[in-house]
Image: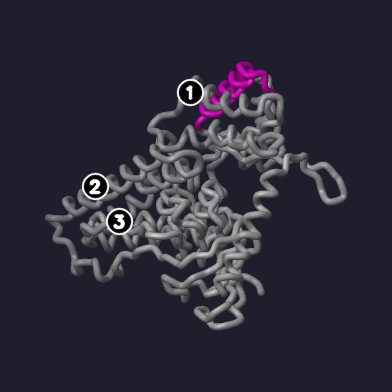
Amino acid sequence: MSASSAPTSLPNSTGAVLTGVPVVPGVRFAPVIRPGRLPALDDLDPGGEVAEADRDAEAARFIAAAAAVAARLRDRAAAATGVASEVLAATAMLAQDRAWLGAAEKRIAEGKPAVRATGAAVDQFVELFTQVGGLMAERVTDLRDIRDRVVAELSGLPEPGVPVPAEPSILCAEDLAPADTAGLDPALVVGLATTLGGPTSHTAIIARQLGIPCVVAVNGLDDVPAGTPVLIDGTRGRVTLSPEPAAAQAAVRAADELLAAMAGWTGPGATADGHPVAILANVQDGSAARAARETPAEGVGLFRTELCFLNRDTEPTVEEQTAIYAEVFEAFEGRKVVIRTLDAGSDKPLKFVGHPDEANPALGVRGIRIADGNPALLTHQLEAIAGAAARTGTAPWVMAPMIATDDEARRFAERAREYGL
């Protein structure tokens, strides 16, 4: 049965199997929990129009609410590590993005209450992101999460989110915001299943880091009530409702034994007929690189450098960048390391770089194209990569995002060679 087809039996019937896209391997058996929800925006909207004399105060109240939400997300980013920290920092920046803030302020200036203006402004960008599709469409959940947090702040309500379960549970939701996923305790939330999302959504990315079995794009999941015992199989992309307990527990044991055997594999990578295939890690900082070094990974296939640029008011210095890059190079000394220059713009804006308003930002001024208007960014980054290479004796491979023409490729290669890369 495909992920888009209907389940073979009633969604809440014993043994019904729902299918989706497997994201994180593993099998777990536990009851379902669901995240809390805000009341409908219409119920929170005070109605009517804001008097002209009160509109400046209403706008100030809105800006303060967005700032408070961003501050809490930044605090959580500082307390988190790895991908979770990176995602929370990016979400905090989204809460302060001038594009949607400006759209809401415009509506407030026209007399709309802050709650209504917040919802309308986010809906405008949700429609745009959905039309763009791809990674941008997967960021719709982030936008809606920011909307709900700001509306809760404006309404004096607790922030929506995931309850702390009293026992190991499987979290099921339409979709999960990165701020919710990043705060999960893998000892209590032992599985994740969502109706929406994809393998590159923030939910999937953080679930991989936490090692929580995860299935996304599960058809029929919305009809499964909290408390339903389910067996989630993140390897095959299945969610079985109310299975026979003994059989479910046996499936968990078998999967754990298989994963333990896989964990003991030391490489090297190869196809079934013996053709060598390099196993390379995807990392974003020294901590992730050191963790990857403890696995059979033979090098780094992608070192994403955005983390040291996000959630900052100013560009990191060459010295700061050099130290960060050197940590990754040292973890894989003598091994292949592919480092990608800054991939910012679109859904990863920088506070210290102006980003133009574009109809299609996902394919617009982002990645290497930002360097056209900010050449010092690339210069400093190449200088830092060269410095880290010299410090560690590593000869990294350097790649740039959003190269689309022969001329762009040639110009980037020439710049990199100027620094001996």
Q: Are marks 2 and 3 in contact (CB under 8 Å)?
A: no
Q: How many marks?
A: 3
Q: Main secondary structure of the magenta part?
A: helix
The magenta stretch is: 374-395
Give percent across and percent down for residue 84.
47, 44
Q: Which mark is residue 320?
A: 1
Residue 261 shows up from this direction: yes
Q: Which residue is mark 3?
A: 159
Quarter that holds the C terminus: top right
Question: Looking at the rendering, which quadrant does residue 38 occupy?
Answer: bottom left
In-image side of 109 versus 353 (left or right): left
Residue 368 shows up from this direction: no
Q: State the residue at coordinates (65%, 63%).
A: 236
Query: How far is mark 1 from mark 3, CA to CA?
Result: 35 Å
Give percent across and percent down for residue 22.
62, 60
Q: Does 392 lie within the magenta span?
A: yes
Quarter that holds the N terminus: bottom right
Which type of secondary structure does the marked residue at label 1 adopt?
Answer: helix
Q: Earlier in the sequence, mark 1 or mark 3?
A: 3
What is the three-letter code of the residue carrying label 3?
Glu
Q: Earlier in the sequence, mark 2 or mark 3?
A: 2
Q: Which residue is mark 2?
A: 64
Which type of secondary structure does the marked residue at label 2 adopt?
Answer: helix
Q: State the residue at coordinates (50%, 57%).
A: 190
